[in-house]
Amino acid sequence: MKNDKDPAHNDASLLARLREGDLEAFNILYDKYWSLLLDESYKRLEDLASCEEIVQDVFIELWEHCPSREIHNLKSYLIACMKYKVFETYKKNKRRNILIEENHHLYRSYEILEGDQYAEKDLKSLIEQWVAHLPQKRKEIFKMRYLDGLTTKEISDLTETSQNTVQNHLGVSIQKLKKLVIQHFLTLLIILYNCK
């Protein structure tokens, strides 16, 4: 690591060089703060792969946005960015776990259909047809969120639509899809019951 007391390698000098697109300055800062950010994020998430991705994202954003941002204390700035990304990851994981639990509960409620490959294919086909008939904007947002795994913020940026509008589209879609899936299961249950 370069000597931080060397005026050419203190944070202020390196930031000034970074604003000019100096890759060497970026690499020095990367080497200096990578381990610290990884350790701090791991204390919060305890998932090495996610933490490495978070730290990578922090440095990518530093490279991209440094020229347009006022950064007075680089260490504090990087730690604040890392904490924000940890929080976002935690929220995303929590939402994913809730979704998994909800779906698990739904399938558990209809155990009679478990293992039925025809029922599963039928349900997939039903959902594909349902998605195909969504209004264009809603279809695009639904696919970006649930097939591509983008966040509502990313979808908002890509579609140049407010985040509230994106969330509203998704809320309407999910409510209708839940009704469709429940109706589908109930119909199958009635058919299976009447076949006995």
Image (cartoon, rainbow, N blue to C red):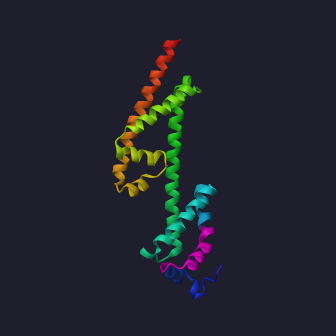
Above or below for 108 versus 147: above
How many marks are shown on the rendered structure? 0
- Residue under the image location 40 percent in, 56 percent down: 158
Q: Residue 40's image quarter?
A: bottom right
> In the rendered structure, which segment of residues is drawn in magenta?
18-36
Question: In the image, 144: left or right of 55?
Answer: left
For the stretch drawn in magenta, the main secondary structure is helix
Above or below for 120 versus 161: above
Q: Outermost residue, bottom direction? A: 7
Question: In the image, 138: left or right of 30?
Answer: left
Residue 188 in percent (x, y) is at 48, 22
Residue 162 in percent (x, y) is at 34, 54
Q: Nearer the viewer, residue 141 or 1?
A: 141
Question: In the image, 153: left or right of 46?
Answer: left
- Residue under the image location 64 percent in, 81 percent down: 2
Q: Quadrant of the N terminus?
A: bottom right
Q: Is residue 115 visible?
A: yes
Q: Is residue 70 visible?
A: no
Q: Nearer the viewer, residue 83 or 2?
A: 2
Q: Residue 10's image quarter?
A: bottom right
- Residue under the image location 49 percent in, 76 percent down: 73
Residue 35 in percent (x, y) is at 63, 68
Query: Is 21 contained in the magenta span?
Result: yes
Q: Nearer the viewer, residue 134 or 154?
A: 134
